Amino acid sequence: MKLITAVIKPFKLDDVREALSEHGVQGMTMTEVKGFGRQKGHTELYRGAEYVVDFLPKVKIEVAVSDEKAEDIIEAIRGAANTGSIGDGKIFVQPLEQTIRIRTGEVGNDAL
């Protein structure tokens, strides 16, 4: 199993959620986060004063999938989140040692 974590632009959340649903993903976790990468924020003007916005709003999505589905899910996220501009985000893939469904006690792929 794999844990796929994607940090994307907030307005792409619905597109990514739809793409994951089309690939059979039944559940995901979404967290509103702030961060920056190569873009290192930007400057804004407020009441005539310029200030730097260091941390930009992002959305972090976490999805647990079987090893067989991992590449398809990664491509689905990449395709749905891509705008072609800087700050589109990152996808991180980690091995997932164990998954347990609390309600039923199912483990492994059955718990997904």
Image (tube, rainbow, N blue to C red):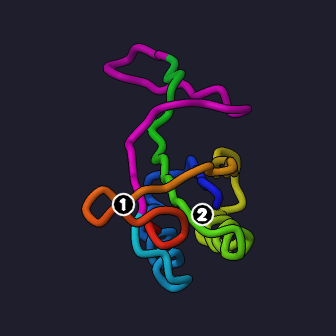
Q: Residue at x 47, y 27 (%)?
A: 44
Horizontal relation, residue 81 to residue 11: left or right:
right
The numbered dot on residue 101 is: 1
Coordinates of residue 45 in the picture (x, y in percent): 43, 24
**Which of the pair 27/51 is nearer the observer?**
27
Residue ID for mark 2: 81
Coordinates of residue 54 in the picture (x, y in percent): 53, 21
**Which of the pair 46/63 is nearer the observer?**
63
Alpha-carbon span between mark 2 and mark 1: 29 Å
Q: Residue at x 54, y 24 (%)?
A: 43
Vertical placement of residue 1 versus 40, above or below: below
Residue found at the far front of this picture: 105
Disc 1 marks which amino acid?
Arg
**Which of the pair 100/41 is nearer the observer?**
100
Vertical placement of residue 41 versus 80, above or below: above
Coordinates of residue 77 in the picture (x, y in percent): 61, 66
Element assignment for label 1: loop
Mark positioned earlier in the residue sequence (2 or 1): 2
Element assignment for label 2: helix
Which secondary structure class fits the magenta region best?
strand
Label 2 crowd (10 A; few <14 / some 14-19 / many >=20): many
Please tell me whether residue 50 belongs to the stretch shown in magenta: yes
Q: Quadrant of residue 82?
A: bottom right
The numbered dot on residue 32 is: none
- Range of the magenta residues? 28-51
Coordinates of residue 104 in the picture (x, y in percent): 29, 66
Q: Residue at x 68, y 66 (%)?
A: 74
Vertical placement of residue 64 versus 94, above or below: below
> How many callouts does the rendering have?
2
Disc 2 marks which amino acid?
Ala
